Image (cartoon, helix red, strand yellow):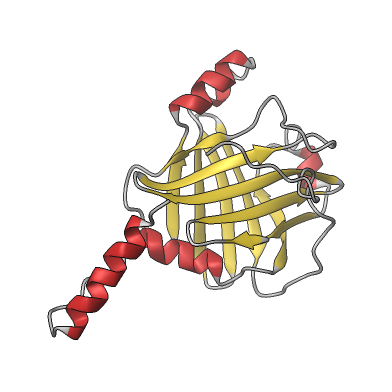
Amino acid sequence: MINIRASLMAITSVTLVAGCTPAEQDPQDAFIANLAEHCGNAYEGRVIKGDEEADATWMNSRIVIEVRECTEDRIRIPLHVGDNHSRTWVFTDTINGLQLKHDHRLEDGSHDPVTWYGGTSYTAGTATEQAFPADDFSKQMFSEQGLSVSIDNTWIVSFPTENTMVYRLLRENRDFQVEVDLSNPVEAPPAPWGWEDNYQYDFD
């Protein structure tokens, strides 16, 4: 896949050499760069806002994210909640904007019936915050799986400070937030489900 933003940055570099006024860095490029700085590291997180009943498992479990795989156009971040290794955040630089998807797996590595939901940013956002409203694929899947309440989901990922990352799920009557401490790398948990030698990624 051609990385359009990378091409634009190359053009900008040529412009700088020519002595023209430099263009500011694309905020989505800067956001991805912030994520990429942590490639290879794992960090602990904690729920800072949620529902004591609905989010009890999260609140009572050790939460660890792992910036496990970074390529030119994609960053994959497994999310471990206790002994549940089913979740991976997938950030992709697309021609339509920055995309966040949730890759959910069953313990045998196969796809969970509720997977690949998320969305693409509809604004440029900033270098420290990007919002991802649920896309049409997600809305249809939620409806088919009896999760219509999630149709209006928006996921927001931000860096409120240099050493803090926040993952937020927001909709009417729902505000769930996990804060991750980026200042103290920890040992990574076991490989996420489906990431062993037979890892398959088939949603392109």
Position above or below: 60 against 170: below
User: Which percent across, then down, holds residue 155?
Assistant: 51, 42
Left or right? Give the position of 105 relative to 147: right
Q: How many marks?
A: 0
Closer-to-camera residue (184/103): 103
Let me know if residue 90 appears in the view.
yes
Q: Residue at x 38, y 58 (%)?
A: 28
From what the image shows, is residue 22 above or below residue 167?
Answer: below
Q: Is residue 190 left or right of residue 114?
A: right
Judging depth in this view, the residue of 87 and 172 nearest the camera is: 87
Q: Position of 48 compared to 136: left or right?
A: right
Residue drawn 64% across the image and 69% down it: 182
Asked if residue 24 can be seen in this view, the reply is no
User: 176 or 125: which is nearer to us?
Assistant: 125
Q: Position of residue 186 (x, y in %)?
A: 78, 70
Q: Position of residue 183 (x, y in %)?
A: 66, 75
For the point 61% across and 48% down, which residue is it? Answer: 89
Residue 161 appears at what percent x and percent y? 52, 69
In terms of depth relative to the viewer, which is nearer, 158 or 124? 124
The residue sitting at 85% across, 56% down in the picture is 190
